[in-house]
Amino acid sequence: MVPELGLFLLILALCLAVTLFFIPLTGSYTGNINWMQQARPLVYGQFLLILSAFGCLIASFVGDDFSVAYVANHANSLLPLQYKISATWGGHEGSLLLWVLILAGWMAAIALSSRRLPLVFSARVLSIMGMISAGFLLFMLFTSNPFARVLPFPPADGADLNPLLQDIGLIVHPPILYMGYVGFSVAFAFAIAALLGSELNSAWARWVRPWTTVAWGFLTLGIALGSWWAYYELGWGGWWFWDPVENASLVPWLVGTALIHSLAVTEKRGLFKSWTLLLAIFAFSLSLLGTFLVRSGILTSVHAFANDPERGVFILIYLLFIVGCSLTLFAFKAPTVSTSIRFAWLSKETLLLLNNILLIVSASTVLLGTLFPLLLESLDRGMISVGPPYFNAFFVPIAMLLALTLGIGVLTHWKGNTLIWFIKQVQWIFPISLISGIAFSLFNGDQFIISEMLAIGLVVWILLTMAKDIRNKTRHTSIFVGLKALRPAYYGMHLAHLGLAVTIIGVTVSSGYSEEKDIRLSPGDTVKVAGYQFRFDGVVKRKGANYVSDYGTFVISRGDHQVAIMHPEKRLFQVKAVVMTEVAIDQGLTRDLYIALGESLDENGSWAVRIHVKPFIRWIWLGALLMALGGFLAVSDKRYRLKRRRAQEKNLEKTPTLPTAGG
């Protein structure tokens, strides 16, 4: 009865989503206050229904109810409890239910905070999100029912969860990534509501900016977690494939980054309104495109669900509907919200505009490289592979230009600066940055690498321009008093930029100066890599909860000092008869030691072994963490929230005909 209850709850949630779309939206045009006020209760009801349905699916997994097809295909009675719970979103149907649950959670958060918004506006925002929710619920109920039964003869046991997913990565990565993906629906709904009302002002930007920043922060964390998961789970030692599904998350992140910068200009100066609206539309549309790529079956990827392409057709039609209707509305309504404010060529506005252009070009470059092979294949023009050489050739130079403009933009002021003033600001920063990059490349490694020189020079450029900006802000008082007076939003901005610099260091150093060796080792053999001595002590058999493994032992030393004892494994998962590589990593702030067992080569205990020494690779994910924390810190600014409330109250005073949701 639990699966039937879950299905019934989803049907009720669909009914509420459809009602949420039509009733409050109609009320916003007819002036019916009672209809508009139904938006919040409908949102809360839908959230509780979907949360309860999700609980029913978890109960089916924990209770080993293999009469449910989804449970039978993704679980097994031997599966550890934590993986039974995470298996709830380990396949297409359950991950789609998680997507809908997170969307309902975002809607509930908007409803809770909407009391001080104009009632007409909040009703339209929640109605648009109700439409999005209804589309996904229809998709789930008609093509991807997670509660479908295997009757009358259910299997005695399940087929087990994909061994690749039996990892903590599955527990944390999808929920956080979806928080970012789905979070962009808030910016989309705010943009459509603004277009419907033909009004977009600084107050609107203040309302939507915190939600967009939080979504961007979660997406940053989600992408970083996915990279970290691939690094330690797949056994190849890298951190980014330029895989189509990885790219599907990177593209909306790039557009979302442009969006939060564009919102800053719209809030501060009332500019870039059309930019902001388009970026809000495309950030969410590209999130939907990523969903289509993952679930359509057209991609071959370790990240894809590879389902029936007919399911992908539904998402594609829905994506085209969302994009088509949004752009049509934008074409008709955008002229009503445009502005003609002028600004100087050397100003923060100009630099943020250039920043947006570079981000959009980089996103377009990645999107083209991802979709072009699929387009050729669909037209029967053959199959090609677009790999790292293409992406590195186009994306890396754009990223370097972004880093350069970041330093300039941090120093410049709103409305404009003189060229002489700017030259005085960077007269020492530029040469120091250039010399630092040259020195780094000269004294590291066996050859001078221009790309590493430029990257490190840009890192120093970012750090010094940040320090200079902080000093400029505190020059009229003592440094400690000045620092205390600066707002958390300001520190959040610099923390995010610091995170970018840290990530650039990690990418540059780990890519240019890593050492690796593929070698045959027998018990007692030693090999030296990057100054570390690796001694192989052999392999023994061990039994896990649902697998048996070849458990290796390596003793690592440097000089006379023992550094670590590491245990890479080859695990045989018995139900699916799949062999998985479990790498051993000795983590450090400045380097990782990485060992992966290959194949057993003979009966004497010889194994193929892959050994990496990867300097500063953890800085890639540390930088991503700092970026996300910077976003969250900016949103936590109490003075900013007070400013937002005052703007809302001021807006209400100007529009007395629009009653508030709080009465």
Image: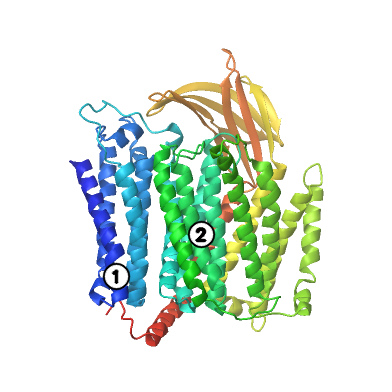
Q: Residue at x 38, y 28 (%)?
A: 546
Residue found at the far left of this picture? 1
Residue 282 marker = 2
Viewer-proximal residue among 564 and 275 = 275
The extreme top residue here reads: 603
Q: Quadrant of residue 312?
A: top left
Which quadrant holds the N terminus? top left
Residue 87 in the image, given as x and y percentages of width and height: 36, 39
Give whichever of discs 1 and 2 has the lower sequence position: 1
Q: Which of 403 and 515 is in front in this view?
A: 403
To which residue does mark 1 refer? 26
Depth check: give the residue in front, 86 or 13: 13
Q: Where is residue 61 in the image (x, y as percent from the top left)?
A: 29, 38
Quick check: 512 above or below 416?
A: above
Other residues around mark 1 within 10 Å, as few (<14) / some (14–19) / many (≥20)? some
Q: Quadrant of the C terminus?
A: bottom left
Q: Which amino acid does label 1 sit on?
A: Thr
Place residue 195 in its image quadrant: bottom left
Residue placed at 34% from the left, 59% from the top? 131
Q: Which of the numbered marks, if any, corresponds to residue 91?
A: none
Say few, some or many: other residues with alpha carbon within 10 Å of mark 2 (under 14 / 14 to 19 / 20 or more): many
Q: Is residue 587 visible?
A: yes
Q: What residue type is labelled 2?
A: Phe
Choose between 552 and 169: the one closer to the eye.
Answer: 169
Report the coloring of the rendering: rainbow
Q: Is residue 479 above or below residue 304?
A: below
Relative to 364, 280 lies left or right:
left
Q: Position of residue 421 (x, y in %)?
A: 76, 79
> Decide: marks 1, 2 in contact (CB < 8 A)?
no
**Measured Cα–Cα span from mark 1 to mark 2:** 26 Å
